[in-house]
Amino acid sequence: MPVFRQTAVRWATALLLIASNSSCTPATARRGGSDQQAIQAAAAGTQSARATTPDGSWQSLFDGRTIVGWHGFSTPGVIPAGWQAVDGAITRVGDGDDLVTDKVFGNFELTLEWRIAAKGNSGILYRIDPAATVTYESGPEMQVLDDDGHPDGKLRVTAAGSAFALYPAPLGAVKKVGEWNAIRLVVNGAHVEHWLNGVKTVEYELWSPDWLQRVQASKFKQWRNYGLAKRGCIGLQNHGDLVAFRSIRIRELL
């Protein structure tokens, strides 16, 4: 079997091994399936991505005062001290775990605003497998960055609005450091869109040959289940820099 087909089968098979939990707590079971079933499941997700419709019901993920509904990725039920509600925003103020939603989501549209300090780096991760060791082993990331001050801003594939290390974002979408940036993240079946300040910075299809090739050419190839979960928690990355998130809303897509 050709190497690429072996890779595609392995990744597609793993799709069937991701549990559909209703909360972002460690999974205890996995269910397998044949290679052909897995390939068909991945294809079905891609083909149906644009056929689904939103239910129109938005829900807030942050009330502006408390961080209820979130927890540290490795500490279910516990909000790390490094995250606090400050001036109406979930703010990284110190060391600690990545912050993730208590609830898991499959297909959704997420909107929020972020602001980061000079030379800062963070990210918004989605469909994080609760059974992973760390968030980025499984959850793809929309990059949050001071493009002008951080070295990652020198490459479009790691700049603000990119699908980190996989799909590049265009120049000029991010605002100057210290200003609020508005994002819209659409994850619908296999279809993903990143929007930054009204600009569509990234559009791609999970599990497609193009996506598989990009993952295999990146650091993510070392993690077997990277990007394969069809449901998972949403995470805010603690990368050691001051960053704030506000006006966080989501609507699930049918």
Image: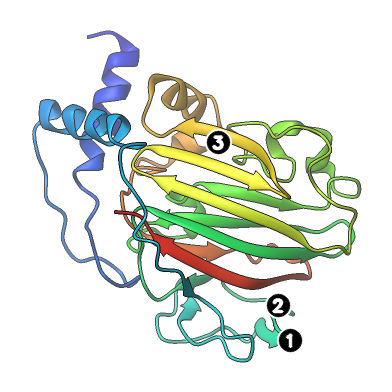
Residue sitting nearer the eye, 143 or 189: 189
For label 2, the residue is 91
Toward the left, the furthest residue is: 34
Disc 2/disc 3 C-alpha distance (Å): 28 Å
**Amino acid type shown at disc 1:** Val
Which residue sits at x=90%, y=60%? 118
158 sits to left or right of 27 = right
Which residue sits at x=14%, y=28%? 35
Residue 183, image x and y in percent?
Answer: 65, 55
For label 1, the residue is 86
Residue sitting nearer the eye, 58 or 212: 58
Residue 188, image x and y in percent?
Answer: 38, 45
Q: Residues within 10 Å of mark 1 (few under 14, many from 20)?
A: some
Tell me if label 2 and label 1 are in contact, CB under 8 Å: yes
127 sits to left or right of 235 = left
The image quadrant that residue 226 belongs to is top left
Task: Report the quarter where the N terminus lies.
Answer: top left
Residue 6, image x and y in percent?
Answer: 27, 19
**Amino acid type shown at disc 3:** Lys
Of the two numbered discs 2 and 3 in the rendering, the one whose residue sits closer to the viewer: 2
Give the mark, 2 or 1, whose residue is nearer the N terminus.
1
Residue 94, image x and y in percent?
Answer: 72, 79
Q: Residues within 10 Å of mark 2 (few under 14, many from 20)?
A: many
Q: Is residue 98 visible?
A: no
Task: Report the quarter where the C terminus lies.
Answer: bottom left
Vertical comparison of 210 with 63: above or below: above
**Which element type, helix, strand or loop, lies under badge 1?**
strand
The image quadrant that residue 43 belongs to is top left
For label 3, the residue is 219
**Which element type, helix, strand or loop, lies under badge 3?**
helix
75 sits to left or right of 17 = right
Vertical comparison of 31 with 218: above or below: below
